[in-house]
Amino acid sequence: MALAAVLVASLAAPAAHAQGHVVTMQKLDWSTAERLASEAVRYCQAQGYSVTAAVVDTTGHQQVVIKGDSVPLQSLSVSYRKAYTAYSYGLAFNMNTTSELIAAKVTGPANGALNTIPEVLFVPGGVTLRKVTDNSVLGGIGVSGAPGGDKDEACAQAAVAKYRADFH
């Protein structure tokens, strides 16, 4: 049981800290998260792709979801899972995109066992959100619906590049 407590504690967001018995954490405010997701959808739309963009906060929960006009149903869950993976594994391995995680082969054993963990999806299209001042992790954004994860990831990265100065 003690090992489980240590494991859970080690997965806490690095920005969290205790003051007395109160734990605080940093995350993007809802309006910045909304602008980020909207920009990713807009950027992809300008490329001719209808996508869904999801932003997760430091709890790993969806903070914002923006769905394009003609995306397939599965893009809702896939965008969330890409954002979740970029956040959680970006935090654990200090990487910035799901593509980087895949290239570094941190996706687990060859049998794909890590892909069986709920919400984890090692597919390009997720970007880790980091604070400007100290590079701490604030969440993740995932995009799904373009014809290829590389295109999804380019849309997410364009949105992050546009609003990164607000991540402080």
Image (cartoon, rainbow, N blue to C red):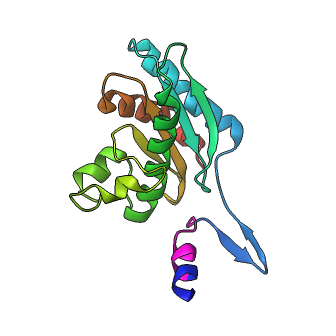
Identify the residue at image location x=51%, y=85%.
3
Q: Quadrant of the N terminus?
A: bottom right
Q: Residue furthest bottom?
A: 2
Residue 131 location in percent, x, y? 54, 53
Residue 111 location in percent, x, y? 23, 57
Q: Nearer the viewer, residue 41 or 132?
A: 41
Quarter of the figure with residue 144: top left
Q: Is residue 113 left or right of residue 85?
A: left
**Residue 17 falls inside the magenta stretch:** no
Q: Nearer the viewer, residue 49 or 116?
A: 116
> How many numbered discs?
0
Residue 85 location in percent, x, y? 44, 50
Identify the residue at image location x=55%, y=13%.
69
Quarter of the figure with residue 63: top right
Residue 33 location in percent, x, y? 62, 38
Q: Nearer the viewer, residue 22 or 124?
A: 124
Considering only vertical position in the picture, is 74 above or below 8? above
Q: Nearer the viewer, residue 50 or 96?
A: 50
Q: Is residue 31 left or right of residue 51?
A: right
Identify the residue at image location x=24%, y=62%.
109
Identify the residue at image location x=36%, y=52%.
115
**Residue 9 falls inside the magenta stretch:** yes
Find the magenta span and give its range.
6-14
Considering only vertical position in the picture, is 19 above or below 94? below
